[in-house]
Image (spheres, rainbow, N blue to C red):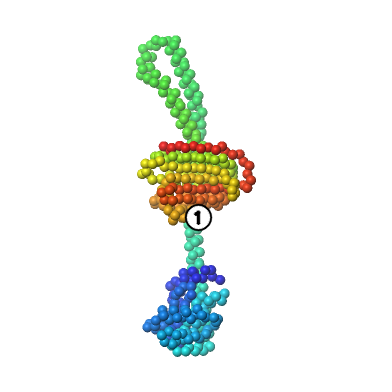
Amino acid sequence: MMNSPNREATLACDGSFEVALTDLAALAALICQVPIALISLNSTERIWFQAPIDCNIDAIAREVRQTIALWTGDSCRVKTLLTQDKCSFVAAPILLSSRVPIGWLCLLDRTLLELDANQRNALQMLSSQVTAHWVNGVRKYQAEQALKQLQQALQTTQAQLIQAEKLSSLGEMIAGIAHEINNPLSFVHGNINYVNQYIQNLFELIDLYQKNYPQPGDEIQQFSQAIDFEFLTEDLPKSLISMKVGADRLQQIVLSLRNFARRDQDEKKLSDIHEGLDSTLTILQHRLKAADRIEVTKEYGEIPLIECHAEQLNQVFMNLIGNAIDSFDQSSNSVQRIRITTETVTHPAPAIIVRIRDTGNGMTADIRDRIFDPFFTTKPRGKGTGLGLAISHKIVVEEHGGSLKCWSEMGQGTEFSIELPLPATFVQPTIAARATSRPAA
């Protein structure tokens, strides 16, 4: 049986269908020797007819519909139809295999219609042909729709595979770079403290020389003035402190890169959601600094470690926080804010909830309803693929059994809520709550 016959019958009426039904109406008029033959499909509100040009087919069709509405028989019957002049018609039901009438094949004449057995059989056969054309039209429509859906699914899958491959390659590249940087960085970082101690020892030795030899020679005095020895002794320790701070910062960046690009295996592993968020913010630091007056507030609650694919969730955080930065009006002089909160809930079911809220421009309801559709983007050409949120939704919902929801209004900002389910009973070490607020610049 065909699904949704009303909708599909309308859509199935393509050019070949039109021609076929018009020809069948003409053939019915010819065989039964009547001036008017028409085919009426209930679901399409369409009429295919064969009649003289001067016939008021619309008026006839209205009368036919009113009379057919009272039809109770399941075979050809003769009725008298009163319009402006007396006329009669014969109607044969057009039936599906379920015996559900989908329309009528009608013959009209101004005299009483009396069909012989052959004409009646021909009329029934022609009505069956109409059914066959209708079924074929619906099947063709269904096949075309299925093909379109398959093509769309194929296009989406290909794009997601390409995007996933890019992310995989990016992760491997980041992991490789982090590894290559980490080795020399560890050497530098580990030796800064020794260098600082050695320099302090040298300064102490120089102090001893000055105490024991308060009157250095002219050459020593000239060289001391040339290198501004007094400034050097004050500035060098400060430079070493700056180098230490820079090395610490580099180590943090490398750690964030390694955490972000961590290659997950097929099985999920216990991971720290806060660590993933912090790593993402570290990687996005250059964008936060490039955009003036962006303040990131972190309100971390006490949450357990969770079994997940950390690398995938880091991609979600990257997409959501990156979109928040994109949403800000760069011409605004006011402080723009991104607020990240985490909490554990137990009702209606145990879960970790991560909320990322921004004070950006917000979205209309139409855009909000489409943001998770593949290839949908409001960014200029070349600035976005339209896959970031679609992939994020897939990661959270399909890979982790959670939910990804969005709230947004124009001028009111946007909030994304990520809910990651926990076991019904979980006993895991908790991570200390942390709350910080910092300007990006």
Residue 61 in picture, x, y percent from top left: 44, 79
In the depicted structure, whether residue 142 falls above or below residue 307: below
User: Which residue is nearer to you in this view: 73 or 321?
Assistant: 73
Residue 167 in picture, x, y percent from top left: 49, 47
Amino acid type at circle 1 is: Thr
User: Which residue is nearer to you in this view: 419 or 387?
Assistant: 419
In the depicted structure, whether residue 362 falls above or below residue 10: above
Q: Image point 53% across, 76% down: which residue? A: 101
Secondary element at image label 1: helix
Q: Image point 39% across, 21% down: which residue? A: 231
Q: Image point 48% across, 81% down: which residue? A: 67
Kindly identify which residue carries mark 1.
Answer: 157
Q: Residues within 10 Å of mark 1 (few under 14, many from 20)?
A: few
- Which quadrant would the N terminus be assigned to in this image? bottom right
User: Which residue is nearer to you in this view: 248 or 43?
Assistant: 43
For residue 96, which quarter of the picture? bottom right
On the question of residue 124 being in view, the answer is yes
- Which quadrant would the C terminus be assigned to in this image? top left
In the depicted structure, whether residue 364 falls above or below residue 87: above
Q: Image point 37% across, 19% down: which residue? A: 228
For residue 211, which quarter of the picture? top left
Q: How many circles with numbers are drawn on the protein?
A: 1
On the question of residue 261 being in view, the answer is no
Residue 348 in picture, x, y percent from top left: 59, 50
Residue 415 in picture, x, y percent from top left: 47, 47
User: Which residue is nearer to you in this view: 402 or 210?
Assistant: 402
